[in-house]
Image (cartoon, rainbow, N blue to C red):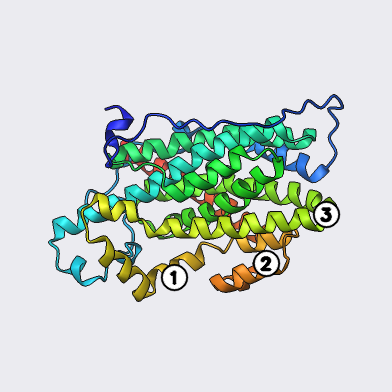
Amino acid sequence: MPFRDLYAIPDAPERWQVPQDFTTVFNWDFAPERSRLLNLYERGKAMQWDANQRIDWSLELDPEDPQQLPPEALPINDAPFFQRMSRAEQSEIRRHHQAFNVSQFLQGEQGALLCAAKIVQQVPDFDSKFYAATQVMDEARHVEVYKKLIGKFGIAYPMTAPLRELLDQVLRDSRWDMTYLGMQVVIEGLALAAFARIRDQAQNPLAAAVNAYVMEDEARHVAFGRLALRDYYPHLTEAERAEREEFLVEACYLMRDRFDAIELWSALSLPVKECLAFLHESGSLAAFRQRLFTRIVPTVKDIGLWGEMVRKGFGTMGVLDFAATDLDALARDDEAVARRFDERRAYVDHIVRAAQV
Ligand SMILES: [Fe+2]
Ligand SMILES: [Fe+2]
């Protein structure tokens, strides 16, 4: 079936074209400048993987609860109107809600692919061009795996309006660091927290493995943004940094709001007002949104965009305490978890082979 036929919202446009106006920079020096970035490039090369080999695509999703998540993963689970529905109706909504979220991962990954390609062209120094080139390949692989996973759901959703708005801004901006700030810091930071929920909570082995392996790569991408920006931002004027901080706070609000999932509730013909009222009054959305900022806040502090505007913005969102998170420890943990998934797969394959003999 053509992918477009999976869209639950009819008449999704076939393409989205974003006109761009930026300068492509050749660097005749070819000189590597920063050893930490070069190390990251070496790791990016060494840690490439083939999604066909590493993931067992013969595994299926669960028909009633595709990723086998705890009931509260559906934010309207405790709403009275949801509780009154039949079991079949409930599992249909659960399936759509999960497909909606994984679709946003897929749509965001295409955005990341194009942003990484833009960075290759625009960024002046060669070690960043080298590293961004490995990220381009990583993001292509992420599009590949989430597309396959969505195929197993048999339902897809288009990119939400807030994600589109942010990507549009980031792709059109002629300053190379804004691409990093919007993509590597905000979008990928949020995505990491969202992937982690599935990786750690899904009982479905396919869904958990896909997110564990994508996270192993994403941890490097966030590190790339940190390394590139924290060398660059101290050289900007106060006014230039203030402009970045303003963009950052707006981008965080924009992304936070996409978790209302209004498009989903209306596609399912659910009472949208009732859904939103429940999400806000029950506090389930607020708790979920806060957790999403675990990775962004410490990164922002690390790159030195820690002026009053940003601290105030994060304070209002109630996420300021995440500034103390140890990002390097989280990244090491993400890699260790991915290795444990490899070990489990090797163990299962071993048992299956032994049984066949
Ligand atoms: Fe990605
Ligand atoms: Fe990424």
Q: Earlier in the sequence, mark 1 or mark 2?
A: 1
Taking the image as shown, residue 242 lies to the left or right of residue 76, namely right
Q: Nearer the viewer, mark 1 or mark 2?
A: 2
Q: Earlier in the sequence, mark 3 or mark 2?
A: 3
> x and y percent of residue 183 in the render?
59, 46
Mark 1 residue element: helix
Give the image quadrant in which the ligand numbered 1 is located.
Answer: top right
Query: Which residue corresponds to mark 3?
Result: 237
Residue 135 vs residue 332, the one in the foreground: 135
Residue at the limit of the structure toward the left, as seen here = 86
Residue 322 seen in the figure: yes
Query: Which residue corresponds to mark 2?
Result: 309
Please tell me how crowded label 2 is: few (under 14), some (14-19), or many (20+) other residues with Cα within 10 Å: some
User: In the rendered structure, which amino acid carries the disc numbered 3?
Assistant: Thr
User: Does residue 48 sit above or below 2 in this rendering?
Assistant: below
* The label number, if any, that marks residue 230 in the structure image: none
User: Does residue 253 sit above or below 157 in this rendering?
Assistant: below
Please tell me how crowded label 1 is: few (under 14), some (14-19), or many (20+) other residues with Cα within 10 Å: some
Q: Quadrant of the N terminus?
A: top left
